Amino acid sequence: MFSKYYPGAAACTLAMTCLVSVPAWAKVSAEEAAKLGNQLTCQGAEKAGNAEGTIPEYSGKWLGKPSGLAYAGTGTPYTDPYADEKPLYVITASNMEQYAAKLTDGQKALLKKYPDTFNLPIYKTHRDWAYPQWICDVSKKNAVTAELVDDGLGIKATNGSSPFPIPKSGLELVWNMTVPAASPREVGTFDTAVVNPSGGISWAREFHKIVLSKADPKNRVETTGSAAWSYGEKLVPQRDKGTLTYARVPYNYKSDFLDVWQYSPGTRRVRQLPNYGFDQPGPGGYITLDEGQVFNGSPERYNWKLVGKREIYVPYNTYKLLDPKLKYADLLKNKGHISPEYTRFELHRVWVVEAELKPGFRHLYPKRVMYIDEDTWLPLMGDNYDARGQFWRTVMNNTVYAYDAQTVWPHSAVYHDLVSGSYIADRLTNEQKPVMLVDDGSLKEEQFSPDMLRGAGR
């Protein structure tokens, strides 16, 4: 089902045509931007529900913690506001054809490969969360001023919100999902489980902190320079313990680059990692570095085609997966996928964007399809295909509304390799302290640098 708010969805039949047309779609008129906050939410989603009533009208009734909900504040577990709900129905291998129009290739492949253990519990759809007014103000400003620059490898916008609330091209969607409205920082320890086809698990653990270029909400600035800075310290496995990594993410990949440095405890030296990202292998070798949370990094290797909108069953309000009472042994007991009883899927409208590898470029995934939530601009799922055009891997990105940060937060992701039968559960925190999201002023952009690694290593 394509959205009435994208009349050109069928027009860009060739990826190169969509790419060439980018400059013409850089900004929208004041009349179209006036839909934000009226027919559209301030982030650009359709306020109305669907005709069947299975997707409700956007309410945005809660900003921060819902009234009456128990929550002790930053650094404590998020209480599930929908804990009492039961699945409306469960999609299995035996009934999947009934729901096929609203399933992705990845979901269908998992249902077929693991018919006895994998399923999709479908819950009532909720669109209850609101963004702070300052984020809405930035979004409305970006609608009429933001533009792609340098062949779409950079943006000119005001930071603090997604740059293109009314997207007209695949590249604009890519920038929306990689520069969403998000918390200004993230500090915590994350566990990664690489589960092989036999069910054996290899573990990794990393302390991580990141600060986004958001500054003071009352003093928004243009998206120049760097978008984010991060620091990571490997704790597990023992062979990697003490390895430190610094990364700086730019707003423009033509005039700048993803700057990554690493400290090795073995050599006690800090070195730059050139050409970091793209299809270099990630944890376990079963994902690529630019596949983290569906997609990250430079869009330069692909032509990006905006397909339109679809109604899809997507992971949503997955508070159960954050529950500290949930032990890893229970979550990871199945082969090929995590335990379905702890997952939650809802029917939502998502933007669909297809990536086709440009001539002269290489990547393990010549074709990728990504599903981007219309309410948050976060990528919720991604399907990846091999050089033969055969389906290969799928990723599901889990999110919750973080009451303290007043934003939707992508807390963990699960990557499935349908060929090998392996999967990776990444950014798990159930057996760690809850992640800190709210900025207390202790993290400064100037604290992140290669010199930071040298000092930390000593």
Image: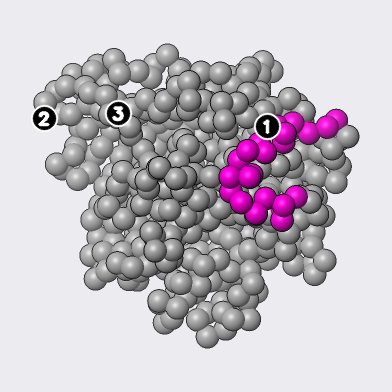
Residue at figure coordinates x 29%, y 67% from the top left: 420
Amino acid at the residue labelled 3: Pro
Residue at figure coordinates x 64%, y 49% from the top left: 306
115 shown above or below 289: below
Residue, disc 2: 266
Which is closer to the viewer, label 1 or label 3? 1
Q: Are marks 3 and 2 in contact (CB under 8 Å)?
A: no
Which is closer to the viewer, label 3 or label 2? 3
> Which type of secondary structure does the marked residue at label 2 adopt?
loop
In the visual, does 449 lie left or right of 11?
Answer: left
Q: CA distance from mark 1 to mark 3?
A: 30 Å
> Which type of secondary structure does the marked residue at label 3 adopt?
loop
Query: What residue range appears in magenta?
Result: 8-30
Residue, disc 3: 274
Q: Is residue 361 magenta?
A: no
Amino acid at the residue labelled 2: Gly
Neighbor class of circle 1 (other Cα within 10 Å; few <14, some 14-19, many 20+) is some
Neighbor class of circle 3 (other Cα within 10 Å; few <14, some 14-19, many 20+) is few
Residue at figure coordinates x 63%, y 29% from the top left: 148
Q: Earlier in the sequence, mark 1 or mark 2?
A: 1
Q: Earlier in the sequence, mark 3 or mark 2?
A: 2
Place of residue 299 in the rendered image (x, y in percent of width and height, measured from the top left): 49, 38
Q: CA distance from mark 3 to mark 2?
A: 20 Å
Q: Earlier in the sequence, mark 1 or mark 3?
A: 1
315 shown above or below 154: below
In the visual, does 193 lie left or right of 100?
Answer: left
Say which mark, if any, is on residue 23. 1
Q: How many marks?
A: 3
